[in-house]
Amino acid sequence: MRVLVTGGAGFVGSHVVDRLLQHGHEVHVVDDLSTGRRELVNRKARFQRCDIRSRRLPGLLTRWRPEAIVHAAAQASVARSVADPDFDASVNIGGTLGLVRAGGAAGVRTFVYISTGGAAYGDTTVVPTPEDHPVVPSSPYGVSKTAGERYVECYGPLLDMRTLVLRLANVYGPRQNPLGEAGVVAIFTDRLLRGERCLVNGDGEQTRDFVYVEDVADAVARGLERSDATGVVNIGTGVETSVNAIYARLARAAGVTLPADHGPAKPGEQRRSALAAGRAARVIGWTPTVTLDDGLRRTLQSFKTPTS
């Protein structure tokens, strides 16, 4: 089918574009390149630089006539969402609503929304956390992404669109930018390869659910292609891994024996996070296939050869 991928020049989005092309789909990409990189966009995809809030977007959709949209573009910095919640809301809520409406007007029939797991559920004693657990976001970013979910789920059916929300765990892998609001795997990998000390916030026993980016791309493709898949689906491994364990595994793979430094804990940081992934297997036929050690090894290698 013809698919529009927003944010297709970014970390997750570019892998989604590659996977959809491998599956034989025609792929169009919209990205404003504020955080994405043009060189990450597969040459077989058609690219247009455009902000999802732009008045040009409806015209692009009318001209391209995509049958489906995968909405991966977002303001993804928690820190920026706290400092500038108006901007965060304008992108993640206003941009999403505008895209859904433009898609409906252009005849789009499937809308896949890439959301967040940990930032949506917040701190909870139910770990791994299932999709029916209440969302209690602790940042404006989490609020805006879950609000975007509600708009997609509400407005999509009004426009005769099938909608699917994928709540991602902590995604890691090749192409992740180690600067800014990066994941801990990318930050540690970059510093280890530079021969620099790594800093762990707090005691390092806070846990996350680390899911490899190519597994995520596979989940998106499966969700897109399963015509009966709707609702909210977690995309994670269901396994908690501490930041200390991530550092130890990466350091061992990189041949580094120095221990990490420890600094103050981040205020408000989640202590535990993992997503129950059973519904993903039932609804879209997806389970993660890349083990953590294999994924970390691939990530380390990709940082050594960044063209991958």
Image (cartoon, rainbow, N blue to C red):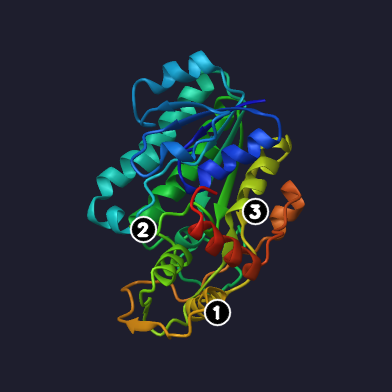
Residue located 56% across and 77% down the image: 249
Residue 189, image x, y percentages: 46, 67
Question: The disc labelled 1 sits on which kind of residue?
Answer: Arg
Residue 121, image x, y percentages: 49, 62
Q: Nearer the viewer, residue 11 or 56?
A: 11
The answer to which quarter of the image holds residue 50 is: top left
Residue position marked by numbered label 3 in the rendering: 215
Question: The disc labelled 3 sits on which kind of residue?
Answer: Asp
Question: The disc labelled 2 sits on which kind of residue?
Answer: Glu
- Visible in this render: residue 103? yes
Determine whether the residue tagged by mark 3 lies in a helix, strand or loop.
Answer: helix
Q: Residues within 10 Å of mark 2 (few under 14, many from 20)?
A: few
Residue 61, image x, y percentages: 49, 20
Residue position marked by numbered label 2 in the rendering: 181
Residue located 33% across and 79% down the image: 265
Q: Is residue 82 above or below residue 161?
A: below
Q: Which sits earlier in the primary sequence, circle 3 or circle 2?
A: 2
Q: Is residue 47 above or below residue 86?
A: above
Q: Residues within 10 Å of mark 1 (few under 14, many from 20)?
A: few
Numbered marks: total: 3
Residue 110, image x, y percentages: 62, 31
Q: CA distance from mark 1 to mark 2?
A: 25 Å
